[in-house]
Image (tube, helix red, strand yellow):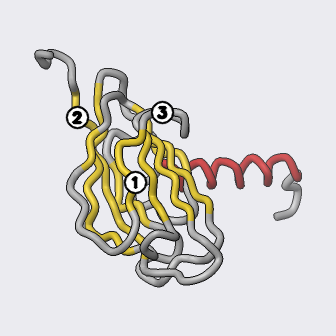
């Protein structure tokens, strides 16, 4: 583009990247998800096999006063070697809600706050189809404890 500055090109690329990370239907190796509801979110290359030696993180943040409900449409990773860990907060130091491995049917998983971290790790050998999930925000204001 004639007359386009490198800074403008960098800014446009950054805007495009941010746009991709917050849109429903996100795939790839992690990202930040901030929409009240979203998905499907998939492991890299889904429905083809994911790659080896991956370390992907998705941070889901919904409006304050809400919880997050994950619903998996499919889950198939290498048993005992590849894992999806789901944390009840914004870091791996938060409580683990679920640690998933192997092919399985996954019941909905609900956070206790408005933030959830998902970390997918794969080893350097066998890969499988991976996973596909969606999330929804559930307002907790007015709920009795």
Quarter in which the N terminus is drawn: bottom right
Residue 110, relative to residue 121: is it above or below? Answer: above
The numbered mark, 3 or 2, whose residue comes first in the sequence reads: 3
Would you say 32 lies left or right of 145 here?
right
Residue 34: where, in percent of width, then height?
44, 40
Residue 114, relative to residue 101: is it above or below? Answer: above
| Contact, mark 1 vs mark 3 (Cβ under 8 Å) | no
Near-viewer residue (131 or 33): 131
Q: Which residue appears at 42% of the width and 79% of the height?
A: 129
Q: Which residue appears at 44% of the width and 41% of the height?
A: 87
For the residues labelled 2 and 1, the Cα–Cα distance comes to 22 Å
Quarter in which the C terminus is drawn: top left
Residue 27, relative to residue 33: is it above or below? Answer: below
Q: Quadrant of residue 141?
A: top left
Residue 16: where, in percent of width, then height?
62, 54
Near-viewer residue (44 or 89): 89
Using a 10 Å C-alpha cutoff, classify the residue at mark 2 as few (fewer than 14 neighbours), some (14 to 19) or many (20 or more). Answer: some
For the residues labelled 1 and 3, the Cα–Cα distance comes to 13 Å
Near-viewer residue (15 or 117): 117
Nearest-to-viewer mark from 2 and 1? 1
For the residues labelled 3 and 2, the Cα–Cα distance comes to 20 Å
Q: In the rendered image, which residue does mark 2 sit on? A: 138
| Contact, mark 3 vs mark 2 (Cβ under 8 Å) | no
Residue 117: where, in percent of width, then height?
47, 43
SS class of the residue under badge 1?
A: strand
Nearest-to-viewer mark from 3 and 2? 3
Q: In the rendered image, which residue does mark 3 sit on? A: 94
The numbered mark, 2 or 1, whose residue comes first in the sequence reads: 1
Near-viewer residue (84 or 134): 84
Q: In the rendered image, which residue does mark 1 sit on? A: 99
The numbered mark, 1 or 3, whose residue comes first in the sequence reads: 3
SS class of the residue under badge 2?
A: strand
């Amino acid at each position: 583009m004639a007359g386009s500055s490198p800074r403008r090109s960098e800014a446009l690329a950054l805007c495009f990247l941010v746009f991709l990370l917050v849109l429903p239907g996100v795939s790839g190796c992690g990202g930040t998800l901030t929409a009240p509801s979203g998905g499907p979110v998939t492991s890299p290359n889904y429905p083809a096999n994911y790659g080896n030696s991956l370390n992907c993180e998705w941070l889901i943040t919904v409006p304050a006063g809400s919880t997050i409900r994950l619903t998996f449409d499919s889950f198939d990773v290498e048993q005992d070697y590849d894992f999806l860990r789901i944390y009840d907060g914004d870091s791996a130091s938060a409580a683990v809600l679920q640690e998933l491995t192997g092919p399985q049917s996954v019941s909905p998983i609900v956070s206790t706050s408005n933030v959830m971290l998902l970390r997918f790790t794969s080893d350097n050998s066998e890969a499988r189809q991976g996973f596909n999930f969606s999330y929804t925000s559930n307002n907790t204001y007015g709920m009795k404890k």
